[in-house]
Image: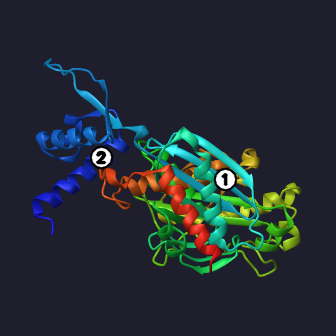
Amino acid sequence: MATAGKRNRIMNRSRILRAIWQQPMRSRVEIAALLGLDKSTVSGIVNELVELGLVQEVAEGDASRQGGRRPVQLQIDPGFGCVLGLELQPGLFRASLCDMHGSVLKSWKEERWRGDAGFSEYVLGIIRDLIADVGETCTSIMGIGVAMGGLINSIRNEIAGSIPMGISGYDFQKEISEKLAIPVIAENDANACAWGELTFHRSRNVHDFLYVLVQMRTSQPGRHLYGGIGVGIGVVINGTLYPGANFTAGEFRSAFYDGQGTGQFSLTDAEAAQVATDPEIRERFFRELARNVAVIINVMNLDHLFIGGDILAYQGEVETLFDEEIQRNWPYDSPVQCEIGLSSFGENAVVYGSAGMILERIFSDQIFPLGDIRNRHGRAEVLSDFNEAVMGLGER
């Protein structure tokens, strides 16, 4: 059992590394002041992290008014490892490889249908092919985030159900993650988008917001599955994703839903199928969505709203409309102070967000003890595990 002193050192190391990740280009002295730690404690731990290759000394800042040595500024070493984000849709996947800063090193977009393959075989096959295609871009994969629509408990790594992927009661941890040499974590697609805004803009003062993900399917399978339209919401409170008591926060059906269609809104299925082509129906849909969102924004006093997904094709129509409905829903004379913005990452919001979720887990000490270099996995080791796992599926 670890002693109290060792536990404190581990905790301080995690706090210091997270501070460097969230607010790069700070000195040892600034980090000590930020965290309320002794300067010698911070200096000793930072020196250890530099030796491990997790932290870089990158520049010298300005000297103080009293003169003396110029402070050395710090950042996470982007080359220490990589994370992989993967988005699954029916017949399509997107993926991005990111360094430890979140910079995109390589991206993929490919049509691939499941066919007769089981879900485990399908997912493992995609990840195996992605890892094989990484080449020399990265030799150390730290973790993989896999995002899709559905009811997903990302802490237990379980999928209660995903209508788009046609699965329910699926133990992602047992069927996918435990078969591989690195953490592979499932997440809901709207939640992944919220992780993306949190992670890739972590130095901004954006702590309480909604991310509204709108997907408008024009294909026959899409219209059959969700009436042509799918909306999910990511909720962020005090700088962290709010999952809800049963990990279903953000699942949505309009307060105006009247049972006429199979989707989430008061539109009939025929009307939902025309949203992309009929401006009048589209305006009805956007306003109904905005009225629902306005209630959440005002009740929870959120200061930001991000809108993403296929709705971005109509950005000229949506921002003003959402602001109108948020102000209309507010019962006081003073205007609502809620900044409305479009997704920072366009069609890649889900995939970047799933990569960002892994970075957040890494720098929250939730995947492995930070600084434990033994947990870095080479590409050859990972591919070996993938091949063994896929072969094992074929023997069932």
Q: Establish if 154 lies above or below 345.
A: below
Task: Identify the residue at image location x=26%, y=42%.
Answer: 49
The quadrant of the rendering that contains the N terminus is: bottom left
Q: Name the residue: 15% across, 46% down.
A: 37
Which residue is located at x 50 percent, y 56 percent? Answer: 382
Q: Quadrant location of residue 23?
A: top left
Identify the residue under disc 2: 17
Instruction: Return the x and y of residue 326 as percentages of the image width and height.
Output: 61, 57
Q: CA distance from mark 1 to mark 2?
A: 30 Å
Residue 325 or residue 231, whichever sits in front: 231
Q: Is residue 307 visible in this depiction of the protein? A: no
The amino acid pointed to by label 1 is: Arg
Residue 41: percent from the left, percent from the top? 14, 44
Q: Is residue 378 visible?
A: yes
Give the SS element for disc 2.
helix
Residue nearest the viewer, comparing 63 with 368? 368
Instruction: From the top left corner, tell me how far across and down residue 166 is, in percent.
Output: 70, 75
Is 212 left or right of 74, judged from the image as shown?
right
Q: Nearer the viewer, residue 306 or 11?
A: 11
**Rendered image coloring scheme:** rainbow
Q: Is residue 336 above or below residue 396?
A: above
Q: Quadrant of residue 226?
A: bottom right
Disc on res. 94: 1
